[in-house]
Amino acid sequence: MKHRKGIFILIIFFFSSGLYAQEVSFSELFWSPCTNRALLAGTSTTSLSGNLENSFLIPQISKASLFFSKPAFNSNVYLSASRFGYHHFNETSFTAGISKVLTNSISISSGLGISGTRVPENAYSEFILQAELGLLCRMNEKLKVSVAARDISREGERTINMHHVSFIIQYTTAPGVTITGGLSKATETRTPSFFTQFVYHLNRSFVFVSMNTAPVQYSLGYAWRKRSMTYLLGMKYHNQLGPSPAFAAQWEN
């Protein structure tokens, strides 16, 4: 079971530009719009993960991410960093947080970070503080339900906006087979995005296929573990903009 936990952790980081644990699958960490860091709670290992994504084969809008997690203070602490863009325009973010198991069926997480946008040629830069919250409920051995809010920021004196909210259900239909479904809503989109994913676990590897709407995008990936390292090769495909190949790796101890 230990190597499977490591695979799950790596997936979360990859899809969200950000990776988790057995409660989250590798494809959820890296390839899911519904990332929930409460899934980290209860992880017993220290991990360091990295992700590169060549968005639509355009280097100027590529993404890179790092994620670190470690058991501490009877909880799990994590640090994440991500970068999007190139030297003429880029967005960066840094987040620190903690996830904790409250009961046998409930885990929570909270984090605080800073996000910045820079346009060096115009001498423009902007930085804002953002928070994130997560809740995970284990209904039984096969069924998990989670809710997460990311990019929570304050606008004005009294207005607090949650720029991204997600809800997911994960069900294990058979040993080694996991089906995940859910929806997410971002403030910049008019309609929610629906998400579904199928993961099949092999001995020390797994394959996954997923699809989400708004925009319509398909994902396919394969991950394998060798000693203390886990690697993932994946591809997202947008109907109009084309493919986005990606690679992720995680060290776990």
Image (cartoon, rainbow, N blue to C red):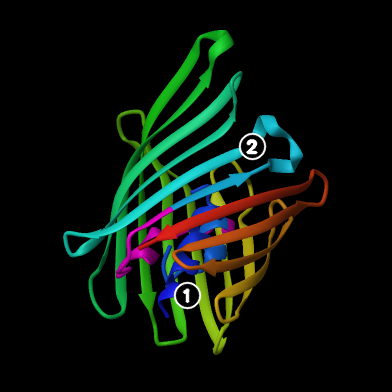
In this view, 114 is above or below 120:
below
Residue under the image location 43 percent in, 72 percent down:
5
Residue at x 71% of width, y 51% of height: 215
Quadrant of res 205: bottom right
Q: Report the residue marked by disc 1.
A: 4
Q: Which mark is residue 51?
A: none
Q: Amino acid at mark 1?
A: Arg
Q: Quadrant of residue 152?
A: top left
Q: Say which of 155 and 18 sits in front.
A: 18
Residue 60 point in image, percent of width and height: 67, 29
Task: Name the residue that disc number 2 marks.
Answer: 62
> SS class of the residue under badge 2?
loop
Secondary structure of residue under mark 1: helix
In percent of width and height, residue 176 lies at 56, 84
Left or right of 155, for residue 211: right
Front tag of 2 and 1: 1
- Residue segment shown in magenta: 31-48
Position of 130 compared to 220: left or right? left
In percent of width and height, residue 23 lies at 42, 72
- Does the image show residue 19? no
Q: Residue 241 lies in what quarter of the image? A: top right
- Give the main secondary structure, helix, strand or loop, of the magenta stretch: loop
Are dots 2 and 1 in contact, CB under 8 Å? no
User: Which residue in the rendered view is the most extreme toward the top?
Assistant: 122
Residue at coordinates 37% horizontally, 74% vertically from top-left?
A: 137
Residue 46 highlighted magenta (yes or no): yes
Which quadrant, please, contains the N terminus?
bottom left
